[in-house]
Amino acid sequence: MKLTTIVVRDAIVPRLKSQKRDEVVGELLDALVSAGSVESTKRDDFFKAVIKREKRGSTGIGHGVAVPHAKATDASKLIVAVGLSERGVEFNSLDRKPVHAIFLLVSPEERPEEHLAAMEAIVGCLGKDQFRRFLRQARSVEEVMTLLEESDAERTVP
């Protein structure tokens, strides 16, 4: 699965304002609403689903990244918002360090295989030191999209 096909360009927030986990989730969902990818009437339900999942175990996977996610019955398609925080966000990460890159994934509940493929693609690129380093330096939507395009190209090379 290509990240550039699931990341909503208009829901990339290169400079998050929020500094707390729940606020960041809300800010990224608001970006998806503004981008027209989430109906405003579904925003709160998606927020509750993501936070419910977060309470079962942190999605802060270490190395300064988190992948909060949820499967929702109201989701019509798989979508991802990306947020970057220069200061870092407390996400109760496995390594207990602040998170600087957040990939928020919402997917239809009835298509778990797509959800899994998206998680594999996201974690695959976030698992690379160089990708994380460049992502942390990104200051614009364009820079984030370029990194995603390069990552997609690397993963499709035989």
Image (spheres, rainbow, N blue to C red):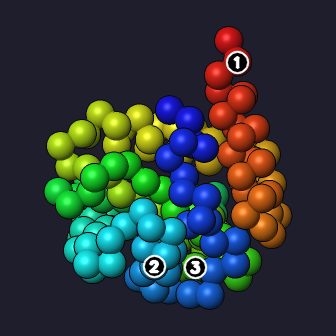
Q: List the residue tagged with mark 3.
A: 89
Residue drawn at (77%, 48%), measured in percent from left and top? 146
Of the numbered discs in the image, which one, if any, rests on residue 30? 2
Q: Amino acid at mark 2?
A: Asp
Can you see residue 65? no
The residue closer to the viewer here, 147 or 4, is: 4
Q: List the residue tagged with mark 1.
A: 157
| Relative horizontal placement of residue 29, taking residue 65 as reference (left or right) | left
Rendered position, 151 above or below 33: above
Specify the quadrant of the image occupied by residue 142.
bottom right
The residue closer to the viewer here, 96 or 123, is: 123
How many residues crowd mark 2 within 10 Å: few (<14), some (14–19), many (20+)?
Answer: many
Residue drawn at (78%, 67%), measured in percent from left and top? 140
Asked which secondary structure carries label 3, the reply is strand
Q: Quadrant of the C terminus?
A: top right
Task: Please provide percent x and percent y for residue 11.
Answer: 56, 66
